[in-house]
C-alpha cells in the first residue's frame, strides 16, 4: 500500500523537522522525503511562483516515490494557489493520503525560526512577507496541527499512520 503524507504550513512551523525525524525513525528505503525548499531553492534555484518548474519536479519525484517507496512525505509551505492542484492529483494516485496543515500563530513561527541554524538566512520581515494565513487545501481528510502539539507528539502520530495498514 502506497502512503502519501503531506505536511504544509508557514515558514518556521516545524514541517521539515518533523518530516526528517519521521523519515529517520524508519529503516532506509521505507520513507522518501521531498522537501519543497530543497527542490525549489536548492535543486532548481527558482522563485516560488506559478511559472517555475518546482511543481512538476515535486510531482515527478512523488511519482518515483510511489513506485519505489511505501511512504512518501511532501513537506513545505506549498502555497495552495501554486501547489494545490498537483497535491490533489497525487492524493488520488496514492492508496492512502494524509494531509496536515501546521496552523501556528506568526509569533510562534518567528520564535521557532530564531532557534534554527539557518536563522540568519532570512528575517522576520521576510517571514511576514511570505505568510499565508490559514492556507488550507480543503481536502476532506485535511487535519490541522495546532501549537499545543509537540514535535514528539506529531512524529508519534505520523509513525502510527505509517505503521497502520
Image: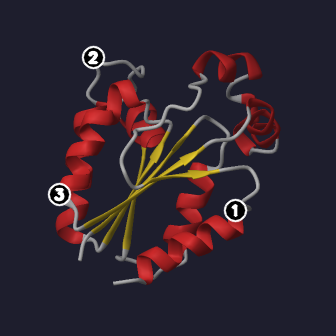
Q: Which of marks 1 and 2 is in front?
A: 1
Q: Residue at x 36, y 24 (%)?
A: 81
| Precedes in sequence: disc 1 or disc 2 | 2
Location of residue 36 in the rendering, given as x and y in whole percent from the top left corner:
43, 40
Q: Nearer the viewer, residue 83 or 25?
A: 83
Between the C-alphas of marks 3 and 1, the distance is: 28 Å
Instruction: State left or right for residue 140 relative to residue 76.
Output: left
Q: Is mark 3 on a helix, strand or loop?
A: helix
Label at residue 151 = 1
Badge 2 marks a residue whose secondary structure is: loop
| Quadrant of the frame with the C terminus | bottom left
Q: Earlier in the sequence, mark 2 or mark 3?
A: 2
Q: Name the residue under label 3.
A: 93
- The residue lying at 62 percent from left, 65 percent from top is 154
Other-residue count near label 2 (Cα within 10 Å), few / some / many at <14 / 14–19 / ≥20: few
Say which mark, if any, is on residue 51: 2
Q: How far across and down, in percent of the image, does residue 30 sit?
A: 36, 76
Amino acid at each position: 500500500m502506497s502512503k502519501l503524507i503531506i505536511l504544509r504550513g508557514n515558514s518556521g512551523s516545524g514541517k521539515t523537522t518533523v518530516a526528517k525525524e519521521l523519515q529517520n525513525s524508519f529503516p532506509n528505503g521505507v520513507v522518501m522525503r521531498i522537501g519543497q525548499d530543497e527542490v525549489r531553492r536548492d535543486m532548481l534555484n527558482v522563485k516560488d511562483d506559478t511559472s517555475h518548474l518546482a511543481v512538476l519536479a515535486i510531482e515527478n519525484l512523488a511519482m518515483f516515490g510511489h513506485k519505489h517507496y511505501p511512504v512518501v512525505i511532501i513537506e513545505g509551505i506549498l502555497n495552495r494557489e501554486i501547489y494545490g492542484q498537483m497535491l490533489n492529483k497525487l492524493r488520488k494516485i496514492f492508496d492512502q493520503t494524509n494531509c496536515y496543515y501546521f496552523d501556528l500563530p506568526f509569533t510562534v513561527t518567528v520564535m521557532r525560526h530564531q532557534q534554527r541554524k539557518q536563522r540568519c538566512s532570512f528575517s522576520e520581515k521576510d517571514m511576514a512577507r511570505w505568510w499565508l494565513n490559514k492556507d488550507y487545501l480543503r481536502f476532506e481528510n485535511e487535519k490541522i496541527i495546532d501549537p499545543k502539539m509537540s514535535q514528539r507528539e506529531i512524529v508519534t502520530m505520523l509513525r502510527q499512520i505509517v505503521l497502520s495498514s
